[in-house]
Amino acid sequence: MMNGDERLRAREDMLSVFQAGVERVRGRVAVSAALRGRAAPAAAVVAIGKAAESMFHGAEEVLGDDLLAGLIITKTGHGDPRQWQRTRVRYLESAHPIPDQRSLDAGQALLDFIDEQPADRPLLFLISGGTSSLVEVLRPGLTLDDLHAINDWLLGSGLAIDQVNWVRQRLSLIKAGGLLNYLGERPCRQLLISDVPGDDPAVIGSGLLVPARRDVPGPELPCWLAGKLVDLLPAPKRAAPTPEIVACLADALDAAEARARELGYVVTRHATFLAGDAAEVAGDLVQQLAQSPPGLHLWGGETTVELPDHPGRGGRNQHLALAAAIELAGRDDLLLLAAGTDGSDGPTGDAGGLVDGDSLKRAGVDAAEAAGYLAQADAGTLLERSGDLVHTGPTGTNVMDLVVGLRRGA
């Protein structure tokens, strides 16, 4: 049995393992290493996504005065606008996960920035998760109300990210490689932090510079939404730059595994990519932990949650953590952490949750009451009561989610 000190130490170790995974894939480190590994000419730099500011700093480190102009578009709260005042860099904060007028303004700012560059100036694009919502140029006939309604539906649909992007690409003039049509003959390079299964560059940021495959079937959609979609744009006339993945989930798992071994744990790294309903995944993970010998377990992926009409506070990782807490109730040998590497879980400012067998007890609820919080997608409210929220703040990266499980020995 674990006493209070042992439980605290176990929780600290799990957080350390998670943080080590995040550190490995920070945008600044990943971009700097990529640019030092291959000669980088003087260029105008465009950084878009939750990790945009961090990635931009990595380009600054290497390019120095050869960074000729800059545009940063990131999620509100994921950068520091004060540091870009009185610089040549234009800094914009935009909307995520639901796009709004700022997303359209940012899309136009992106096109304007490209148009302002000399016809022969190289462009360096730094793209990370969140880009799909942060910048948009709509197809003719679509309105901001359409965009908002569609993305609101997508957010609660439970669809996987590749299916979500299949829809988004059919609304846009810049997704699915459409941005290539605005580059002219300017040399172009793209560095990507992957937040998608399989690290498919056509899905990262909805593929601004990567034409989409045309043989991918779409999801089943309600009639009102399907009626607003159109075919993909014609293939761009210019060649797409080779996508360079500079950080991904596997990198984070490598670092998390190394840290766990440093701490003295026997580590099992599971190859299975976590996907599907978060609560169902939680049940499977707890069962695996319960049937395993003592040690630390690592998984990665991105689950989904189908939201009710009026969801409460939380995100997919908090949902998974609370579902796990229900399964763990009363056990003193199992703990589970689920958190987003970007530091923000769904629309919240928390990364996820770290739960154990006393989580429900600390929150003052039984399993049935906790299940009610799950049904209302309000896991964050209960996890705050139990003291189990994981809060990191914006991390400067985004490679999906890490799950750390621990089974203590007798």
Image (cartoon, rainbow, N blue to C red):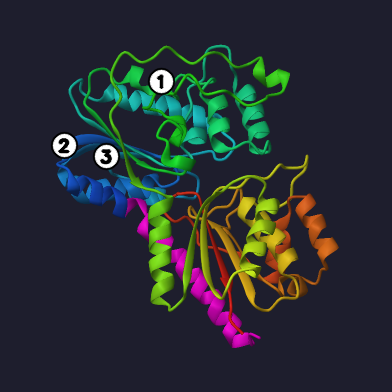
**100, above or below 3, in the image:** above
Marks 2 and 3 sit apart, C-alpha to C-alpha, by 15 Å
Q: Position of residue 105 (x, y in %)?
A: 47, 28
Give the camera-side residue of 59 and 68: 59
Q: Is residue 136 left or right of residue 121?
A: right
Q: Nearer the viewer, mark 1 or mark 3?
A: 1
Q: Residue at x 18, y 47 (%)?
A: 37
Residue position for label 2: 42
What kind of residue is marked 3? Arg
Report if residue 340 is visible in the image: yes
Residue 360 in the magenta stretch? The answer is no
Q: Which residue is depicted at the point 43% across and 51% down? A: 249
Look at mark 3 in the image and give the residue it sits on.
Answer: 88
Q: Quickly name the residue at label 1.
A: 178
Q: Residue at 74% across / 46% down in the picture?
A: 311
Quadrant where the N terminus is found in the figure: bottom right
**Residue 366 screen position, x and y as percent:** 83, 68
Q: CA distance from mark 1 to mark 3?
A: 27 Å
Quarter of the image for the C terminus: give it: bottom right
* Predominant SS along the magenta part: helix
Q: Position of residue 215 (x, y in %)?
A: 49, 20
| Viewer-side label of 2, 3 | 2
